[in-house]
Amino acid sequence: MRALYDRGQAFVQAGEPSASEREQLYVALVSETERLGLRYARAKHPCRALAQRLLRHQEELFPFVLVLAERSLRPVVVVRQISGGTRSAQGSETRRMLATVFATLAARGQNPFTGCLALISENS
């Protein structure tokens, strides 16, 4: 199972795969999970309970392969958890706006410093 999880993580970290590529990998990972689960779920094996649980929850193990939007929110969530959040609604709005600006600049391949200078110059 760890190898399957690592395979999924490596796939999504490698770039921005298309929806069909994500769906293909998801189906392959779920199928392999089912194969592993069936292999041990009916046998007298120490992994029997785990195998049965894999079979029950196989559809829930790899949603990160299908949903890439959650990955883009992860850094914002981590910063909020580390810092304890903001102290006001205005602070939350400012942090959200800055995260959006920097994510947009990164998606466009622009330098954050020059991008911010350009935005400030436009609004002056």
Image: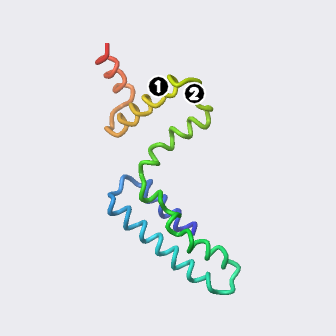
Q: Residues within 10 Å of mark 1 (few under 14, many from 20)?
A: few
- Considering only order in the chain, which callout, 2 or 1, is on the residue closer to the N terminus? 2
Could you tell me residue 89's position as x and y percent? Answer: 52, 25
Element type where label 1 sits in the image: helix
Query: Whole-Å distance between the Cαs marked 1 and 2?
Result: 10 Å
Could you tell me residue 98's position as x and y percent? Answer: 44, 28
| Residue at 46%, 48% in the rendered image | 70
**Image-based side of 5 in relation to 111, left or right:** right
| Residue at 55%, 78% in the rendered image | 36
The amino acid type, in three-letter code, at marker 1 is Thr
Q: State the residue lying farthest toward the bottom.
A: 43
Dot 1 and dot 2 residues touching (CB under 8 Å): yes
| Residue at 36%, 31% in the rendered image | 111
Res 22 → quadrant: bottom left
**Image-based side of 93 in relation to 108, left or right:** right
| Residue at 61%, 76% in the rendered image | 51
* Quadrant location of the C terminus in the rendered image: top left
Q: Is residue 53 above or below residue 9?
A: below
Q: Which residue is mark 2?
A: 86
Res 123 → quadrant: top left
Element type where label 2 sits in the image: loop
Could you say which is closer to the camera, residue 101 or residue 60? 60
What number is the disc on residue 58? none
Q: Which residue is mark 1?
A: 94
Could you tell me residue 68's position as x and y percent? Answer: 42, 52
Q: Residues within 10 Å of mark 2 (few under 14, many from 20)?
A: few
Could you say which is closer to the camera, residue 54 or residue 104? 54
Total number of numbered labels? Answer: 2
Could you tell me residue 42's position as x and y percent? Answer: 62, 85
Q: Is residue 113 above or below residue 74?
A: above
